[in-house]
Amino acid sequence: MLPKVSVHRFSCAPFTNVENYRRLVGGDVIDEIEALAHALKGARVCHINSTGFGGGVAELLARLVPLARALGINADWRLIQGSPEFFRVTKAFHNALQGSAYSLSESDKSIYLQVNRESARLLDDSYDVFVVHDPQPAAFRAAVGERGAKWIWRCHIDTSEPNREVAAFLLPFLELHDVAVFTMREFALPGLDARRTAFIAPAIDPLSTKNMELPDALCLEVIANAGLDTRRPRVVQVSRFDPWKDPLGVIDAYRTARREVPGLQLSLVGSIAGDDPEGWQLLARVQEETAGDDDIYVFTNLAGVGSMEVNAFQRAADVVIQKSVREGFGLVVSEAFWKGKPLVAGRAGGIPMQFPEGHERYLISSNEELAARVVELIGDPAQRKAFGAAAREHVRERFLLPRLLRDELRLIHSVLTGGERRAPPPAAPGAPPKR
């Protein structure tokens, strides 16, 4: 059976009304979004990625697509579906583009190109713009040929130091796109034409179930029902079960910190993405490592832990952890900061740009540093409060969904009209949006 591309269409629920965000981000951003949407009204935009759940790209598209549709843009979201062998290859590509060692075989090339070719043939040819996310469908543009549409490759990972063999294989396919988008300038794939690159940071939706306001009492009830002791201090890491997120390093650092903070509890709240076969292997290793430790809790999205529970776990934590060793952006950082929570994180990728000025010491490079900063914050409630307040304001100014939507609409408009393709970076420090 041939691989398929399936389409997800979202109804415009009340939360998709862009006016609901005006009180959070200010009038200027919302007014510009509405003007851009008016200029693009009726445009057909197709987003393509490889999974509908369990990863940051799926989470972004689940919010962006219905919001764009509510503004009058005909936005669709399609999934590339392939065999387990295809996702093994594309996961290897994903890791290799972030610098992992990998020997690219002719068989892997064939598997990758076959799925891209057969899937691309099923695309509706009436779209004005295709936005292709990450390496999995990067060869669609070559397979489709000339149809008159514009093509954008949206890269959500750090490709600044890629495996040369994989980069050389993918580069001819990427160069066929009208523009390539990276989270930040430093992530740009070497060899791509810099005149056809743009830089747009991701963002979180403050009105989503994962980020909406929740009463403290409800959050404590949720974690208590999950087995935690609400009378003792708590740290949490929320992320995919992925080696780059280093959950085993988190466990090691937690055990060091617990010597200084008796009774400290750790929750690892992770997700398994549909296009990530490595996730199951790492989850098994984490469960084996934590077996018999009554103060470490492991939860997944496949066992009843959804967005609301993640929200509650983050809000109920004394300190949030994100020990990434490589990172594209790390939505969970902005999620925790939006909730006013202090966070200790790896100095990796797009994480530092999310930190408020003056709190960079909580960016760490080792398990020992992580443990020390956790102990410090657990023992200093005033610092936790000040850090959390500064972090929330930093995210409000730069990393909420309307800013991302505005930047993407600017880019789509410029690509369709042949204008300047570069999207602006987030607002400079000290320049909050007008209200």
Image (cartoon, rainbow, N blue to C red):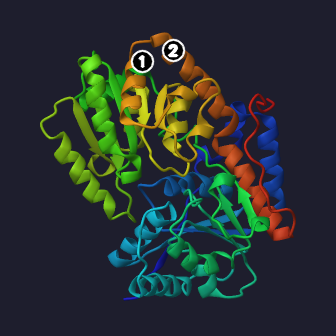
| Location of residue 349 in the rendering, given as x and y in whole percent from the top left corner | 55, 47
Looking at the rendered image, the quarter that the C terminus falls into is: top right
The answer to whether residue 41 shows anywhere in this view is no
Upstream in sequence: badge 2 or badge 1: 1
Answer few, some or many: residues within 10 Å of disc 2's Cα (few below 14, many 20 plus, some between 14 and 19). Answer: some
Give me the residue at 81% from left, 31% from top.
434
Q: For numbered disc 2, what is the local secondary structure?
A: helix
Location of mark 2 (residue): 383
Q: Circles 2 and 1: CB distance less than 8 Å?
A: yes
Give whichever of 160, 390 is nearer the camera.
160
Residue type highlighted by circle 2? Gln
Q: Quadrant of residue 403?
A: top right
> In the rendered image of this protein, does residue 410 appear above or below residue 172?
above
Q: In this view, does 225 lie to the left or right of 129?
A: left
Q: For numbered disc 1, what is the local secondary structure?
A: helix
Q: Which mark is residue 376?
A: 1
Give me the residue at 73% from left, 59% from top.
198
> In the rendered image of this protein, does residue 190 appear above or below residue 428?
below
Q: In which quarter of the image is residue 110?
A: bottom left
